[in-house]
Image (cartoon, grey):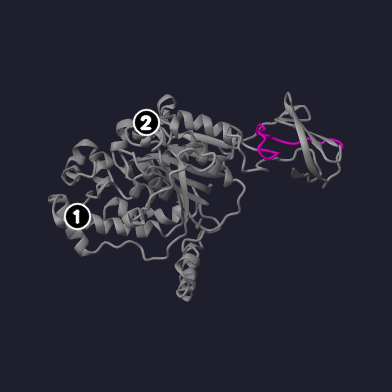
Amino acid sequence: MARVLISGPIDCLPFMFINDRCNCGNRVSCVVPYTPIDRISCLNIRNTDPGTEFPVLNFRRRKGSVEIEALSGTQCKVQMGESNGASVDITPDHLLVLVHGIMASPSDWKYVEAELKRRLGNRFFIYASAANSYTQTLHGIDVAGRRLAEEVHQVIRKTPSLKRISFLAHSLGGLFARYAIALLYRENSDTHAQSSEQDSKVEMLDNKSMAELKDQYTKFPNATIAGLEAINFVTLATPHLGVRGKNQLPFLLGVPLLEKIAPPLAQYVIRRTGRQLFLTDGKSSKPPLLLRMASDCEDGKFISALAIFRSRILYANVSYDHMVGWRTSSIRREAELVKPPEHSLDGYKHVVDVVYCPPVLTDGPSYGPETAKAKEAAQTTPSSKRAEDYYDKLEEEMIRGLQRVGWKKVDVSFHSALWPFFAHNNIHVKQEWLHYAGAGVVAHVADSLKQQEIVTFIPASL
């Protein structure tokens, strides 16, 4: 038996997410557990007293409404999309930006966009980015990130009702989104004073375990992304640590020879973006872009921008992803990869594990003279031992930088799917007829986004 608290005065009461744990895969909210009810825009309660709590017995579906029978015998009519006979116009206030990956287009999000609209309702303005389609994704992560940032600005200017913002990105699109949010990040004038005060507090807490420490990047009162409150930052199979290293680019099959010759060839195949993914971009004296994106630097406040999101979620394929390895998409060290569970979570097929990783208080990533020399060696003789040491060093520095904010890590396994080798495209159902195995992952993403609509903000740790 569910209990519905009716607060008053009651004319048009928002009625959403009463039961967040529901087995109705194609619904948004429920009144009675395990009973699907369409999204409800408002309530129109009749013959009731304000503040009454009704133990619900049953309900009946009617055209345009749902009739609920309470224990007291009173009947409450729930009008869906109507109030006093007039249509209720819900203005979207939450911008959800979908960012596709390499050599892709907004059409990759066709299934996800339709599914999220159905599950999340009219409060979300879902926008599939078109700023970096097909070969434009090869122009560089920074160039694509700037285009995306400008596109988001334009969407916000044209939609004044927006108050919140979230990002959902696939593959390389996750790096575009990380660069864009650093450009869109805005903080209040008291930031530096608060930062100094926080640093002094951290020194006093150095005897406590790292897991108990608050994130050093606390949300500032007025910190925003393009003037909007930052809610969710979600990536699907994104190479956050680049693609250089053992099994980081799985279609090379872990063969050492192929992994050694891939970096010099990348600049001819995927051009500037390839050099950035293989960490060989720029002069040897300057840190590669992905290392700079693991810190706050002159290019942008990359970590501060990530930190102000209520939720940061990494979805990673544990196997069968030919493009992006498990380690780089989940921001883990090799030693941190453990055998994942074989069975899916209830209601989310192929989602096998969820881990909450609190922020780890460390210094920012470093790039000293020795690392610069090693980078030069990687650019000139990529198969040398010094080049291998360079990549190992950079991977560790990137992990240290990115772990300064908390992450929710979701492991996905398509080992039982009919076509498991399509994992990279299954994870976001690129083509519904071919990649539908990822529908459970999309459902999990939708529920994660929905959850943040009702939780209280916890500064930068999950």
Chief secondary structure of the magenta span?
loop
Q: Quadrant of residue 203?
A: bottom left
Question: In the image, residue 175 lies at what x, y percent?
Answer: 36, 45
Whether 204 is drawn above or below 318: the answer is below
For residue 390: magenta?
no
Q: Which residues are magenta?
A: 30-47
Question: In the image, residue 315 lies at what x, y percent?
Answer: 43, 44
Whether 435 is drawn above or below 256: the answer is above
Q: Secondary structure at mark 2?
A: loop
For residue 41: magenta?
yes
Q: Which mark is residue 419?
A: 2
Q: Is residue 227 visible?
A: no
> Which amino acid type corresponds to the residue marked 1 in the rendered image?
Glu
Question: In the image, residue 408 lies at what x, y percent?
Answer: 47, 51
In this rendering, the label closer to the viewer, 2 or 1: 2
Q: CA distance from mark 2 to mark 1?
A: 34 Å
Label 1 crowd (10 A; few <14 / some 14-19 / many >=20): some
Q: Which mark is residue 388?
A: 1
Q: Is residue 284 left or right of residue 315?
A: left
First in sequence, mark 2 or 1: give its number. Answer: 1
Label 2 crowd (10 A; few <14 / some 14-19 / many >=20): some
